[in-house]
Amino acid sequence: AVLAEPDPQGTANAVRALAKCDLGRGPASGAAAAASAAQATEPTPQDLASRIRRLPVLKAQNDPSTHAIAKEGLNEVSETGNQSLAYLVDADLPLAAAAEALRARMEDLARQVVNMLPKHLAALPAVRPLTGSVADADLAALQVDNLGAVGSRSVLEKLGIGPVPLAFESVAEERIAERLAAGPPPSLLGGPAAAERVRVQSELVHRRVFGFATFRFEFEGVVILEGDALNENGAKSFRGGASRWLQPTNLSINRWVERVLCAEFQLVAEICDRLDTAMRGGMEDPMRRLCVTGSLRLLTSTSPCLSCLSMLRQMQLLLPSLTLEVSFRSMSGLADGG
């Protein structure tokens, strides 16, 4: 019934559902792809984004409509919104001739994002309690929540944040797999309020996002804190709530999502809290923070949103002598960015 009179969004949902059920190799998925390709005229930005996000599934199945959808998308490059651009760049399209133009646009967008991120601590709300996210008119004007894998890596490189070692990625994936096998942790809040919070957040977060970090901090040449931590997005996070040191940002597309509950935000915020306690006297004094050396390695199961890219920049400014390494990988069954 869905395929009889498909709309672009409905078709996209059908193809993704078929893929999840491992039924996408049959004639039904081919019909869905053909129906979507037939509607390639005058696509809206949402239509185009839906088709673009479907490309990896179709490409893996050698679907003949992949090339047609890719060509359509590339013909719309000059008019494509920034969020659709991120999908295009990450989709590894079969038309290599347009790759340079796509990446050039993404590089320009990444430069814009870097220029909008905090430049100094005066722009940060550090050392005072926060109540939630703030609006950023410049970032909101870009109309993008997540730059995808290619765009996010470009931003991090421009900030001087390199990737984690491959051995660390393996350890992180093992820890995340263990958490998945164990099931979601119970809420720390308890009671009806916690249950309602979990319900609301589950409607906003389609799939689970994890962050895993290892850290080692030294102060005046003495190791004061080291260990590792694993966290999950949404109300399932072990911490929850705002940070005294880091500020989340409201984004333009999914404005209803509370970015303070991003897995990597909560993970880094918790590490900051633990470091503040370990320093005996706290880390409010910028000269004391300057004396903190060591490393923080972080891997997330999806590319970070713009709010979390801003958070990583804030962490750089908060602890300027710290070595920060960040990577992200798409993992089966987990979210693909948002």
Image (cartoon, grey):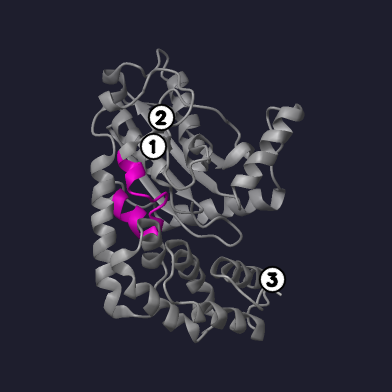
Instruction: Return the x and y of residue 230 as percentages of the image width and height.
Output: 56, 42
Near mark 3 (Cα within 10 A), the count class, few <14, some 14-19 or many ≥20, is: few
Please say if 163 is above or below 266: below
* Nearer to us in this view, 264 or 134: 134
Residue 79 is left or right of residue 148, and the answer is: left
One can see residue 319 in this view: no
- Amino acid type at circle 1 is Met
Q: Are marks 2 and 1 in contact (CB under 8 Å)?
A: yes
* Element on which disc 2 rests: loop
Quadrant for the N terminus in the image: bottom right
Residue 44 located left or right of residue 74: right
Which portion, as a residue range, is magenta? 138-156
Q: Which residue is mark 2?
A: 246
According to the picture, the residue beneath numbered tag 3 turns out to be 21
The quarter of the picture where residue 117 lies is: top left
Q: CA distance from mark 1 to mark 3?
A: 36 Å
